[in-house]
Amino acid sequence: MINPIYGTDVLLNAALWVAERLPEQDRRIHKLFKILWFADLLHLKQYGRSVTGDTYIAMNYGPVPSALYDMIKGNCSPELRVFTQYDKGFFDISKKCNMDYLSESDVETLQKAFDENAKLSFDRLVQKSHSSAWNSAWKEGENTSIRMSEILDEIDADDEIREIVKNERETMAALSVKNG
């Protein structure tokens, strides 16, 4: 589920930003997902919001951004089908990132997560992403959503960040009731 405040444009362009920087032979959805996970954790800890706004689920090889995974599999509207040749974990892209959708802090955090994780092996990314938030959801079963409270605990979020997240979630709930 994507955060309605963010919309799919930020998620899609954050993913494209990362994908453009991965060498073609290294464009695996696993690597893309883990770089975005770590970017979201960094941004959440620093600014009180994730970059992507996506909901992560616990899967065997670590956290997976749910809405992005659906986009990559083609389970989305035609205008969001920019991931091509999805085969055996590899993908390509048919569109370039539109930087208008990413903030300065988004790009800064994406770059940091990319620099720290792009060259890590599959196994190292699995090990690094199997942390407390993932473990908590995994105990409930594969494909369980990773709770924001667990993510906030994992990043050791301070009270100010927790309050920002709480207020955003209340706004999202109010918007969904109003629009529902």
Image: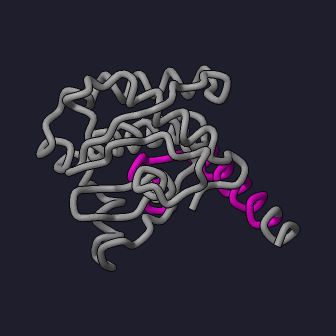
Q: Which residues are magenta?
A: 149-174
Q: Residue 112 lies in what quarter of the image? A: top left
In this picture, residue 85 sits left or right of residue 100: left
Vertical order, 105 against 91 (above or below): above
Residue 164 falls inside the magenta stretch: yes
- Residue 168 lies, in percent from the top left, at 71, 53
Q: Quadrant of the C terminus?
A: bottom right
Residue 153 vs residue 177, the one in the foreground: 177
Q: Residue furthest right?
A: 178
Provide the major secondary structure of the magenta segment: helix
- Residue 139 lies, in percent from the top left, at 28, 76
Vertical order, 173 against 102 (above or below): below
Q: Residue 37 lies in what quarter of the image? A: top left
Residue 75 vs residue 136, the one in the foreground: 75
Residue in view at x 34 percent, y 56 percent: 63
Residue 128 vs residue 1, the one in the foreground: 1
Residue in view at x 54 percent, y 40 percent: 12
Residue 46 falls inside the magenta stretch: no
Residue 9 visible in the shown view:
yes
Residue in view at x 67 percent, y 57 percent: 166
Vertical order, 26 against 86 (above or below): above
Q: Residue furthest bottom?
A: 140
Residue in view at x 55 percent, y 33 percent: 13
Vertical order, 173 against 33 (above or below): below
- Residue 79 lies, in percent from the top left, at 61, 44
